[in-house]
Amino acid sequence: MTGKRLLLLLFFLIVFAAGEGHCWKWFSAEVPDSGLKGNSFIDIVYNDGVIWMATGKGLSYTTDFGETWYTHNIGTGMASDEPSAVFGRPGQIWAACSYSVLYGGVSYPFGAGINFSTDNGLNWTLYEPDEASAYAKLVYDLTGYGISTYAACFYGGFIVSHNNGATWSHVYYSPADSSDYVADNWADLESGRYYACAVDSLHADSLFLYGGTARGINKFIFVPRRVKMGGNNVSSIAGSEEYYYIGHENGISQADTAMGKFYTCSYNHGLPINGYARKLVYFGGRILAGMADKSNDNGRGIYVLEDANQQWTGLDSVLTGEALSIWTHLMTEPFEGADGGVYDFKALNDSVLFVAAGDSGIYMTLDSGQTWERFYTDSSDMAQTTLTNQILSVDATSDTLYLGTKGGLIKASYVPPFTIDSTIYLQFAEDDSTGSMVTCVRHHEGDTVFTWVAVAPHPDSGGIGNYSTIQIIDADTNLIWAVYSITPQTITNDIIITDSATTFATSTGLRGNYNLNQPIVTNFVYSPKDDTTGLTIVNSEFQSLALVDGHLFAGSNGGWGRRRTDSDWSIVRANTNSLTHDLAVAKTAVSSGLPGNWVTAIAVQDRAADTLLWAACRAVSDTVTQYTGVGYSSDFGDSWTVALQNEFVWNFAFDNDGGIYAAASGGLFYSTGDPDVWQRAEIIDFVTKDTIWEETEVYSVEVVDSILWVGTSFGLAYRPLNDVDGWTISRVFKPTESDEDVFAAPVPFSPLLTDGRLTIHYPVVESAEITITIYDFAMNLVATVAENRSRPAGEDYFETWDGYNEDGDMVATGVYYFKVSYSTGEEHWGKLAIIP
């Protein structure tokens, strides 16, 4: 128990140095030692039918519920004889190790790495991340979920491994948390010092990870993809009256107008497998999506969402049930296949919709997509191989079409419902002899009528051709144009026009041009940055633009944004890595009612109707608003209720009937289900008359099947859950053949701990009267622990000392000696250390 307890006492006194690096060692273990080796049990874990005990003399285990025990230590592959935390998952057991160095009467703890085994300790691998392998860098707690294993390290912070310990990385609550660790300013940021961790995975596909620190609880939230922004490669954006729709590499997401809630649809909601939304359009109260295959960019057809103004709160039939199919496959042919599908939409007055379908041509529907008509700009040439029949972009007014084709720009007048007027038909003949295609066309009618087109080389040209964006001024049937050259080989992917400016989504950034009443290019560059979060999407390829309710939206391959002002944007960047958290929230005594800011244990109780989060807390800084004791929360740590006030709690356990157990310095406490009503348990073996006396600290507790296991500072106790008096107590006694039979525990010892007691153990071979005395370093008598006590032969005995001298004063920190004198003339000496 040296590590955790000592550092809790020394927390505000010690300075450390941090480093980085990882290494590992592999050990083939010898046969583990038979039996328990220590009497101090700081952690209990049940895993794969094995009960594991972290003791002060090694990692002990039993496969037969305590009938036989074995112990792993340095001799059998462990990094040290002092495991500080244990964690198990199917097929794996993890044990963090530590050791202590006594200097000047004070014991200083060191981390010794993390042992890992996949065969119940037959073989061990030792990993030594810097965060868990140096002075004061030791692991206090371990937890995990899925392939992720988390370690709460004191000076090392919060770390995680996703590959069974081979590499470790930090879990930072904030950038300040990160920089604090790097700069070694540990005392400046108590929230970066971790003592406990726990995972709550009981809520469908949501996950809550809790870290107990010296300044409250850091809560890390892992949001399921269906209720967050689902991708960052944003290919299209559209808006309804109520919501925004964002097409990306993992499907389509919906955002409310405040951009505070997101929902995502993918293949299990009716969209095609491996599909992304190449183009979206709001049309007639619906959202139409031109889907494509993200592996080869083949068209996958048009899908429709019938109600674009309804929030996607019910994407699943029940919270853990099948996903609802809310998208309908509206049209397959001709919007599928290589070089086909939907490249662009243009909606007119919720009655006419044009679709640019690549090599499949240009289509129109007058009945919301029930039927489609293909048309040609030249009825005498209907060949699909003709470049002007391969349509990449479309814009339209009530009587004019603007088509971006692989053969250039086409402007054609038509008579509704649709008849091309071949007398007013212009093809923009490009002057670049290598040939280029128009990938985007956008028309504007205002004070000045003009059109912008984006030009790029043909796919089969090897990248050689015309890269430019061209402004065309309409003057009757003539085309007057000015080239807007950005940078060499810059591709313009999308264009949006307002009266004041034109914005270009390009492969080298987000650019713009002020619209003047003449064919003059006056350009500028946007630098989208969120002044609130600090997020930017400056160094990205921009792929899509939209104008929704007066707001400019820009989508890139690194997220998307909505412009608030020219210099301030709302930036959204999705977390698509399920192994990293989406949100981090700090909870303190002031912000949430947490009993105390120093959190040394966290546990999640699964009840029939809900879950409770439990935290063992210490009061720090003040005792007016903070309490030493226990807190519980029914709202994921957002608010807390205080229980077990003034008790130092080290660990929690729960049974299937709602029972709650707390291992504390003041003993074992339990509740039958009401978190506000607690009792203290007496631990007495009525068969052997042995007892865990009131002064003994209880460090660990666990429920295994129908047995309650309790680890203390001097012995292990267990009983059936349904028999409160059925305790069995196990203690380890040293062999009675040598002077080493006499020892004191715990060493070092602090009289400041609640009910703190030092135990001096000794054997009696021949009946005798026993006297035990304490001396300081100068051999002055300090205290008499026992005097002329009669002890029968053949037994082991112990006496306790509270750390006070003959005058009733607490002794000073330092090294002391004790002597056990027998009336037979035998004497044994021992050494002990007192710490604050």
Image (tube, helix red, strand yellow):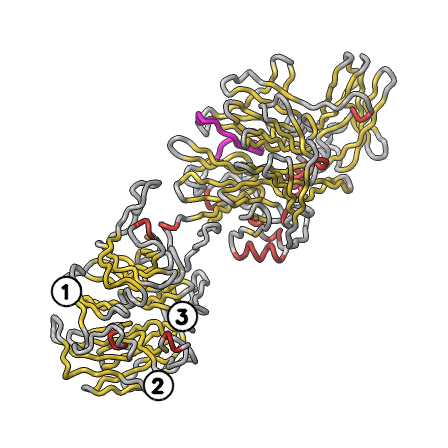
**The residue tagged with tag 2: helix, strand or loop?**
loop
Q: Secondary structure at mark 3?
A: loop
Nearest to N terminus: mark 1 or mark 3 = 1
Q: What span is in magenta?
A: 642-659
Q: Nearer the viewer, residue 263 or 595?
A: 263
Quickly name the residue at label 1.
Answer: 366
Task: Estimate the x, y position of residue 304 in percent, counting from the top left.
Answer: 24, 56
Report the residue at 16% width, 61% height from top. 371
Q: Is residue 193 magenta?
A: no
Mark 2 and mark 1 lie on one chain; the one further toward the N terminus is 1
As shown in the figure, which amino acid type bears the numbered disc 2?
Asp
Vertically, is 299 above or below 32? below
Identify the residue position indicated by label 2 in the image.
432
Amino acid beneath label 1: Leu
Cα separation, mark 2 vs mark 1, equals 38 Å
Please give the residue where the numbered disc 3 appears in the rendered image: 567
Residue beneath the point at 63% across and 49% down: 129
